[in-house]
Image: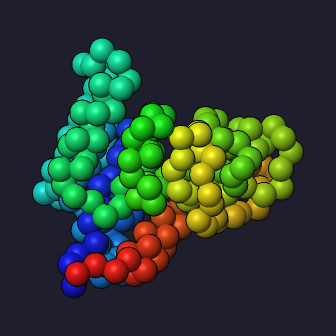
């Protein structure tokens, strides 16, 4: 059976990418990361990829005249590595509807809230300000609307009286990692490949 191929898009430190790579190395995730793509040279995810011998590509939006040109270049490179699944793991850019429509059922995103609550940024602070007693993370299918695709799975945790946005983020991160690995593993095991 062919290996389940993952492309990972990330803008930040790459902790979700590292969780995927650790699970692959441990033999608990039957997959291979075939390319990592970022939009910032400073993204830690790109360095993690390079250290693991995985092709790492940076596409700076400023190098392109418009969003459409950026998306075309980025996804031409993503498609060239022939991924079975494209994982948005802290990728802080909205994808154009054309990109999403061309890859149905192949794009997932991890988001640090219990969607449909708190799409977009500052999710931990927003949960605290709303007086929520519960917070979490969501993996969902990507659609053209921001953080609005069908939910695949969620992880939940209780918000404590002493929690700040920072402590909530720190407590949620390990649950995000476990959730993402579990969802990718489930998708990989359900996909029929020759």
Nearer to me, 106 or 22: 106
**Is 132 left, or right, of 20 in this rendering?**
right
Q: Nearer the viewer, residue 22 or 89?
A: 89
Point out the image quarter for the C terminus. bottom left
**Residue ID at (27%, 19%):** 64
Residue occupying image coordinates x 65% and y 41%: 119
Q: Residue furthest bottom?
A: 1
| Residue 185 image position (x, y, % from top left) | 42, 75
Inspect this view and state whether residue 68 appears.
Answer: yes
Quadrant for residue 27, please give it.
bottom left
The picture places residue 149, in percent across and down from the top left corner, at: 60, 51
Viewer-nearest residue: 167 or 47: 47
- Whether 182 is drawn above or below 13: the answer is below
The residue drawn where x is 36% and y is 61% is 85
Residue 115, x across and y down, in percent: 69, 52
Number of marks in picture: 0
Q: Is residue 53 left or right of residue 173?
A: left
Q: Is residue 43 left or right of residue 119?
A: left
Residue 52, above or below 127: below
Up-down relation of residue 72 to residue 179 (above or below) = above
The residue sitting at the top extreme is 65
When asked about the image quadrant of residue 1, the answer is bottom left
Specify whether residue 174 is in view: no
Q: Is residue 143 above or below residue 125?
A: below
Residue nearest the viewer, comparing 75 with 21: 75
């Amino acid at each position: 059976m062919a290996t389940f191929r993952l492309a990972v898009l990330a803008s930040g430190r790459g902790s979700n990418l590292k969780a995927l790579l650790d699970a692959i190395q441990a033999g608990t995730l039957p997959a291979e990361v075939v390319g990592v793509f970022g939009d910032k040279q400073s993204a830690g995810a790109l360095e993690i990829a390079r250290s693991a011998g995985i092709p790492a590509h940076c596409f700076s939006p400023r190098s392109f005249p418009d969003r459409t040109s950026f998306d075309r270049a980025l996804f031409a490179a993503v498609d060239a590595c022939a991924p079975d699944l494209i994982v948005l793991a802290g990728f802080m850019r909205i994808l154009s509807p054309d990109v999403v429509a061309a890859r149905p059922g192949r794009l997932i995103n991890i988001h640090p809230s219990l969607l449909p609550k708190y799409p977009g940024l500052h999710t931990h602070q927003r949960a605290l300000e709303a007086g929520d007693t519960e917070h979490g993370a969501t993996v969902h299918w990507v659609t053209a609307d921001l953080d609005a695709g069908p939910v695949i799975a969620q992880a939940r945790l209780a918000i404590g009286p002493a929690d700040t946005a920072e402590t909530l983020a720190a407590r949620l991160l390990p649950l995000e990692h476990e959730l993402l690995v579990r969802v990718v593993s489930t998708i990989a095991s359900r996909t029929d490949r020759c």
